[in-house]
Image (cartoon, rainbow, N blue to C red):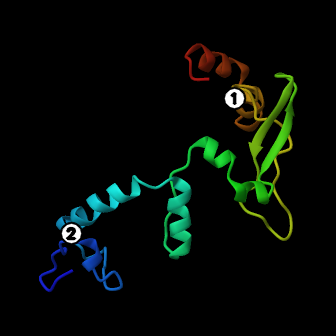
């Protein structure tokens, strides 16, 4: 930025070591975002992320579900758990623990519940609702 706080004509002229996003004006941000956005459009997600790592920057590409499922880091730490789904007659892959611990762990042990599968157990058992209450809630479309 120049002495008046204006963005220079070229991004190469910005002293990035002194640049402070917290004090930048909207005009300065706009001057940076347009050429930066045009440049980023030319990169693949892998190229972008490789550049982020190389430069020790904070950044991560937006991921699709397919990207996440094929992420080599998640595969390397055995994140995905495959469990049988008897009703479908096949196996389903579920996400595993979000963090690894030296003691104890969380790993899914059964398939995800079907919609309403545990209604009686939760509403009747845990919450103590009577059968009549459940009937009214079901007729009203609440459950």
In terms of depth relative to the viewer, which is nearer, 119 or 98? 98
In terms of depth relative to the viewer, which is nearer, 126 or 130? 126
- Give above or below for 87 relative to 60: above
Q: Is residue 79 left or right of residue 62?
A: right
In terms of depth relative to the viewer, which is nearer, 136 or 36? 36
Q: Residues within 10 Å of mark 1 (few under 14, many from 20)?
A: few
Disc 2 secondary structure class: helix
Quadrant occupied by the N terminus: bottom left
What residue would you read off at disc 2? 28
Front disc: 1 or 2: 2
Residue found at x 33% / y 62%: 36
**In the drawing, what numbered circle is on residue 129?**
1
Disc 1 secondary structure class: loop
Residue found at x 52% / y 76%: 56
Q: Residues within 10 Å of mark 2 (few under 14, many from 20)?
A: some
Which of the two discs, 1 and 2, labels the residue nearer the N terminus?
2
**Residue 84: x and y, percent?**
87, 33
Residue found at x 65% / y 21%: 133
**Residue 78: x and y, percent?**
81, 55
- Estimate the spatial distance between the alpha carbons at disc 1 and disc 2, rounded to whole Å: 59 Å
**Residue 131: x and y, percent?**
72, 20
**Residue 108: x and y, percent?**
81, 46
- Give above or below for 84 relative to 138: below
- Give above or below for 21 relative to 3: above
Residue found at x 56% / y 57%: 46
- Callout 1 touching callout 2 (CB < 8 Å): no
Quadrant occupied by the C terminus: top right
As drawn, the residue found furthest toward the front would be 42
């Amino acid at each position: 930025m120049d002495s008046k706080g204006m963005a220079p004509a070229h991004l190469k002229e910005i002293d990035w070591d002194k640049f402070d996003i917290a004090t930048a004006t909207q005009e300065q941000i706009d001057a940076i975002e347009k050429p930066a956005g045009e440049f980023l459009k030319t990169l693949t997600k892998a190229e972008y992320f490789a550049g982020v790592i190389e430069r020790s920057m904070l950044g991560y590409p937006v991921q699709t579900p397919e990207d996440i499922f094929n992420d080599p880091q998640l595969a390397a730490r055995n994140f995905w758990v495959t469990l049988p789904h008897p009703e479908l007659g096949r196996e389903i892959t579920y996400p595993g623990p979000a963090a690894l611990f030296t003691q104890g762990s969380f790993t899914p042990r059964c398939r995800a519940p079907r919609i309403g599968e545990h209604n009686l157990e939760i509403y009747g058992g845990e919450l103590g609702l009577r059968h009549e209450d459940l009937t009214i809630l079901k007729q009203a479309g609440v459950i």
